[in-house]
Image: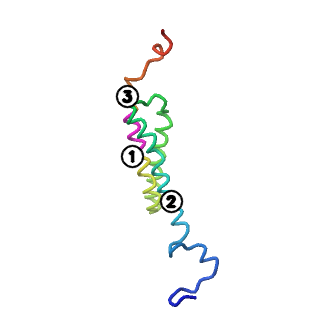
Amino acid sequence: MFSGQANINNEEAVMLICGVELYIVVGWIAVILGNVTAIPQVWKSWRTGSSNDLSIGMISLVILAQFCWFGYGYGIRDNILMISAVAPFVWYSILTCIYYKNKNKRPQYNELFDP
């Protein structure tokens, strides 16, 4: 045992990474991964100006779910949960704006099948 190191058993050692409990580390990894999931779609829609294949229903549900997760995290005072809800809420809100901005640029159903 190193001098100054706490006397902990093996089970407690597994649960610590650099002095931080494992579930906290896993929570922050989930925050980072969850916060970047929408970036490729937002970037592609922004760059191409196309949002034809986006499901506005799915996007709306994701925004609502993130809003609810933030409220729940606030209620139980869980900072990781609140932070993890903010970025996807913002990214999918941007995607919604792109969707409606490009709505008039989409071909109508008739235009797709008329020669």
User: In front here: 64 or 103?
Assistant: 103
Task: Please tell me which of labels 1 and 2 falls first in the chain.
Answer: 2
User: In front here: 26 or 85?
Assistant: 26
Locate residue 101: give its quadrant: top left
- Distance between mark 2 and mark 3 Cα atoms: 34 Å
Q: Position of residue 42 (x, y in %)?
A: 42, 40
Residue at which label 3 appears: 102
Does 67 appear above or below 112?
below
SS of the residue at dot 2? helix
Task: Tell me the number on the disc at residue 98.
Answer: none
Task: Please tell me which of labels 3 and 1 falls first in the chain.
Answer: 1
Residue at which label 1 appears: 90
Q: Are marks 3 and 1 in contact (CB under 8 Å)?
A: no
Residue at which label 2 appears: 29
SS of the residue at dot 1? helix
> Which region of the structure is painted magenta?
91-98
User: In front here: 58 or 30?
Assistant: 30
Q: Are marks 1 and 2 in contact (CB under 8 Å)?
A: no
Q: Residue furthest bottom?
A: 3
Q: What's the residue type where badge 2 is placed?
A: Ile
SS of the residue at dot 3? loop
Does 50 appear above or below 11?
above
Q: Residue at x 50, y 72 (%)?
A: 20
Q: Residue at x 46, y 61 (%)?
A: 80
Q: Are marks 2 and 3 in contact (CB under 8 Å)?
A: no
Q: Position of residue 105 (x, y in %)?
A: 38, 23
